[in-house]
Image (cartoon, grey):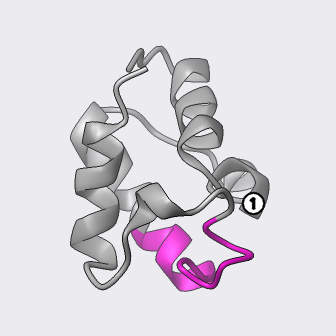
Amino acid sequence: MNVEPLRAVLSEIRPEFDFGESKDFISDGMLDSFDMVLLVSALDRKFGISIDGREIVPKNFCSFEAMASLLHKHGVCL
C-alpha cells in the first residue's frame, strides 16, 4: 500500500502533525470531526469519488489502513 497520497492530503489539512507516527489519528488528537469533513472533500476531489455521509465516521479515518480500506470500497487502490 502506498500511503503517500493520503499523507499528502493529511499534511494539507493538518501540517503540524507527523501522521506516520500515529496508529490512531483520532485518539491521538490529530483529526477531529471538522478535519474529517475536510478530508472527505479532499479525497473526493483527489480520487474522483463520492464518499457517502454514512461513511464519515471515525473508524474510517483513524489510520492510513482504514482510509485505504474505505477508498478501496470506492474502487481506489493505493
Q: Quadrant of residue 56?
A: bottom right
Relative to 48, residue 14 above or below? below
The residue sitting at the front extreme is 21
Question: What number of labels is visible?
Answer: 1
Mark 1 Cα shell of 10 Å, populated few (<14), some (14-19), many (≥20):
few
Q: Quadrant of residue 58?
A: bottom right
Question: Position of 18 compared to 26: left or right?
Answer: left
Relative to 2, residue 62 above or below? below
Q: Nearer the viewer, residue 16 or 74?
A: 16
Q: For the point 77% across and 53% down, which residue is it?
A: 59
Q: Secondary structure at mark 1?
A: loop
Q: For the point 62% across and 55% down, which residue is it?
A: 61
The residue identified by callout 1 is 57
Quarter of the image with the C terminus is top left
What percent of the width, then of the height, locates residue 21?
A: 49, 62
Q: Quadrant of residue 22?
A: bottom right
Q: Nearer the viewer, residue 33 or 49?
A: 33
- What's under tag 1, amino acid-wise? Val
Q: Which residues are magenta?
A: 25-38
Relative to 24, residue 68 above or below? above
Q: For the point 66% across and 58% down, which residue is it?
A: 62
Question: Position of 57 compared to 5: left or right?
Answer: right
Asked whether residue 44 is drawn in magenta, I would say no
What percent of the width, then of the height, locates residue 64?
A: 53, 43
What percent of the width, then of the height, locates residue 16?
A: 30, 85
What percent of the width, then of the height, locates residue 1?
A: 43, 20
